[in-house]
Image (cartoon, rainbow, N blue to C red):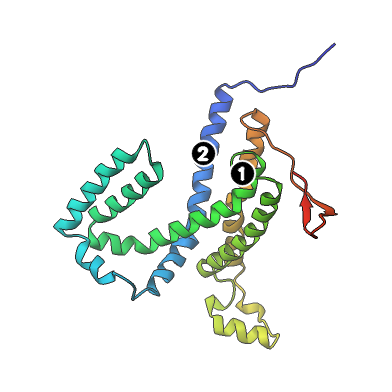
Amino acid sequence: MTTSAYKPKAGSAAVAFAVFSTLTMGVMLLLNLQPWFVLGKDVTAQIDTGPLLGVADWLVGGQIAIALGIVFLIAAVRFSKRRKLISAQLVICGFILLLDPGTLIRALGEIVGFLMWGWIQFIQVSPMLAQHSLIPANGQWIVQLKQYRAAAYFFEAVACFVKYPPYANGDINRLMNDLSSFSLSASQWNWINFFWAVVVMMCVEMTFKFLLKAGVYSGAFSKKATAQPDTSTSKKGYKVYNQ
């Protein structure tokens, strides 16, 4: 007697779960974005000089900018089938040129923060994507991705603690002085901010891991074996990774 593996059937429950999980992931992403918006404004505040900034002030918002924006969008449509990356870049440039300069300046911090957030999040989830065959990677590359993820978490911790300072209301001088003298004051800790910093930093990856496991269970995709470094070495002294 043979038995077949259980495969859940798609139905109303699956649709409800998909809708609920999508909404939940959207809330988690929006919550995780907040520290990066703050950090993005701090980063743009440091950029007061740079190449072609004067040209940008003259160009954005004028008639030339509107004409160039339309040209870029038309070119993006022509490149959409053959050069998708170039098409996406042309779309971004076209919309930037069509924006009102006041709106662009006010949203510049959020734009920079969004770009930083997207890059850091991709680095963090890339090992999981590779393990589930959603992006191409061999065993050694997966190990390296995990190392990059650790560095990405450091940068995200900085962003979260800028938004939610856990000690002395974000007074860095007070924190460094107390650390150097080993006299951290219990009254200076803001445990609510510390809690939110940890939650915001971990919520996206925890939700993403759960959705990946749900995808494996439903048969949407499969998980391949995690690469483990082999203890053996080659003749030249390099470690050999099992794939």
Percent from the top left, x then y, of residue 65?
Answer: 20, 56
Looking at the picture, tell me which residue is in the foreground, 192 or 119: 119
Alpha-carbon neighbours of circle 2 within 10 Å: few (<14), some, or many (≥20)?
few
The mark found on residue 22 in the picture is: 2
> Amino acid under label 2?
Thr
Determine the CA span between mark 2 and mark 1: 18 Å
**Residue at the spot of label 1:** 129
Q: Secondary structure at mark 1?
A: helix
Q: Nearer the viewer, residue 243 or 221?
A: 243
Q: Earlier in the sequence, mark 2 or mark 1?
A: 2
Q: Is residue 39 above or below residue 17?
A: below
Residue appearing at x 62%, y 20% in the figure: 9
- Return the x and y of residue 75 as percentages of the image width and height: 27, 43
- Tell me which residue sits at (26%, 48%) in the image: 72
Any part of residue 195 in sight: no
Q: Tell me which corner region of the image, top left, top right, bottom left or bottom right, holds residue 41.
A: bottom left
Q: From the top left corner, tell me how far across and down residue 133 is, in percent.
A: 63, 38
> Height in image: 33 above or below 6?
below
Numbered disc in front, either 2 or 1: 1
Q: Is residue 91 left or right of residue 190?
A: left
Look at the numbered disc 2 and give the secondary structure of its residue: helix
Q: Position of residue 107 (x, y in %)?
A: 33, 60
Graded by Cα atoms within 10 Å as few (under 14), some (14 to 19) or many (20 or more), the crowding at tag 1 reads some
The C terminus: image quadrant:
top right
Inspect the image, locate mark 1, and give the three-letter code of the amino acid beneath it.
Leu
